[in-house]
Image (cartoon, helix red, strand yellow):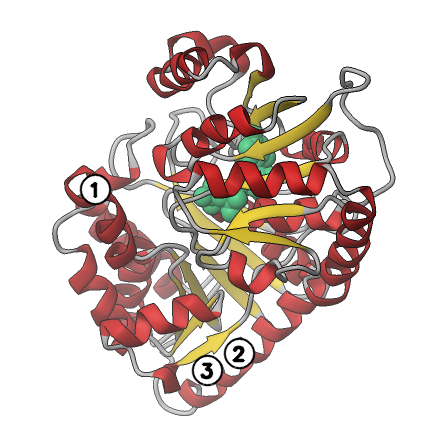
Amino acid sequence: MRIAMISEHASPLAILGGEDAGGQNTHVAELSAALADAGHDVRVYTRRDAVDLPVTVRSPDGYDVVHVPAGPAEPVAKDALLPHMKEFSRWLVDRWRGGDWVPEVVHAHFWMSGLAALTASRQTGVPVVQTYHALGTVKRRHQGVQDTSPARRIAYERELGRSVDRVVAQCQDEVGELVRMGVPRSRMTVIPSGVNLTTFAPLGPAADREPGRARILTVGRLVERKGFQTVIRAMTLVPDAECVVVGGPPAGLLETDPYARRLRALAESCGVADRVRLVGAVPREEMGRWYRSADVLVAAPWYEPFGLTPLEAMACGVPVIGTAVGGLKDTVVEGVTGDLVPARDPRALGTAIQRLLDDRMRRFAYATTAQERARLRYSWAATAERLAEVYGEVAAVRRPSRVVA
Ligand code: UDP
């Protein structure tokens, strides 16, 4: 099939770890690669955020990335992108009406991509599949006044859910949230993200580590809701281990990053600064080395729409201690592949980490089943196959009357 992906702020070619670059970028890159590998013709449309970007770049993974002129050709925070979505969709309509390449389906990632896709769809008849990646209702609940999303986000998300051809939710928790928002269950299909089983495997090089000291790894964009403060506080209950934090700006810019400075100050005040190390952003292809160097991956978000990092660790055969939120409740099987603890509870987290470090056999059992679960249930090839079925279904419904070539 000819498949258009729209990922307005998250380019599959971006460097990860920064404030707006994380799971969605990985998801779009891996999904597009898996679909291309299965023989589909995939184009990813993302906003042009630098003047020197060519319109189309061929990814080595067999799909095209198209840089759409919408707003200034420079980085813009995703919460400021809404005013540029009309321009984005107009550009798509011009292209698709021009007829050189007309998609049979468009898969929108994040709500603003959904708006651009839906507007373009209304003029071209191309059916829309929507994946939210994150929901405004959940963000508002947890971040309150600190949530900088546009005021109409939640209303737009509800409207999208009722208007697109299919919503693809990534976990059961998201289904519940969407139903509470008023999106009918009948419009949804649950298809989880996958994990790259070649990059993330138990065998392979591992990052250096200090002999005789256990390593707790935690990974993510350096934003408050990822719960790094809880992890640092928990380290007071885990006296013989080090905590490595991967993610954030590149290492050279960590010194000036306000949140990194707060984490360092917190580690000082908790008396664990000598055992907490901030590494900064790590290129995607080097992530496996970091996971493999760890005894335990800790993921302590306040909320998490899916959460790729626990799954990546599992695929590397690393047990996970996570908070019982969002996608982690589906990926981590309590007492089988890892442990789940309440969010924002350093005592529960620290106790669970120390208990696992004290129990070698339990770690070994978790590691084995975690790796097996990732391999059997979360390959990108399987995710792409299930999505391709959905694309086929929505295209078949639309094809007879509405597609304007
Ligand atoms: N990641 C990376 N380098 C970093 C930090 C993170 O490549 O320095 C990747 C990580 O391997 C994962 C993604 O960024 O693929 C983060 O996805 P996740 O779903 O855990 O969190 P999100 O960023 O979507 O909130």
Q: Which residue type does callout 1 highlight? A: Asp
Say which quarter of the image contains residue 233: top left
Residue holding disc 2:
390
Please report contact status of discs 3 and 2: CB closer than 8 Å, yes or no.
yes
Camera-nearest residue between 195 and 7: 195
As drawn, the label of residue 394 is 3
Disc 3 beta carbon < 8 A from ligand 1? Answer: no
Q: Which residue type does callout 3 highlight? A: Val
Q: Quadrant of the C terminus?
A: bottom left
149 lies above or below 89: above
Residue 80 point in image, percent of width and height: 21, 38
- Is the residue marked by circle 1 packed among few (<14), some (14-19), or many (20+) residues within 10 Å? some
Q: Which residue type does callout 2 highlight? A: Val
Callout 2: helix, strand or loop? helix
Instruction: For marks 3 and 1, give the CA distance.
Output: 34 Å
Q: Is residue 364 left or right of residue 1?
A: right
Residue holding disc 1:
147
Callout 1: helix, strand or loop? loop
Residue 131 point in image, percent of width and height: 42, 63
Disc on the earlier residue, 3 or 1: 1
Residue 295 point in image, percent of width and height: 73, 35
> So how many labels did they put on this image?
3
Which residue shows up at 29% across the image and 58% down it? Answer: 116
Q: Is residue 396 visible?
A: yes
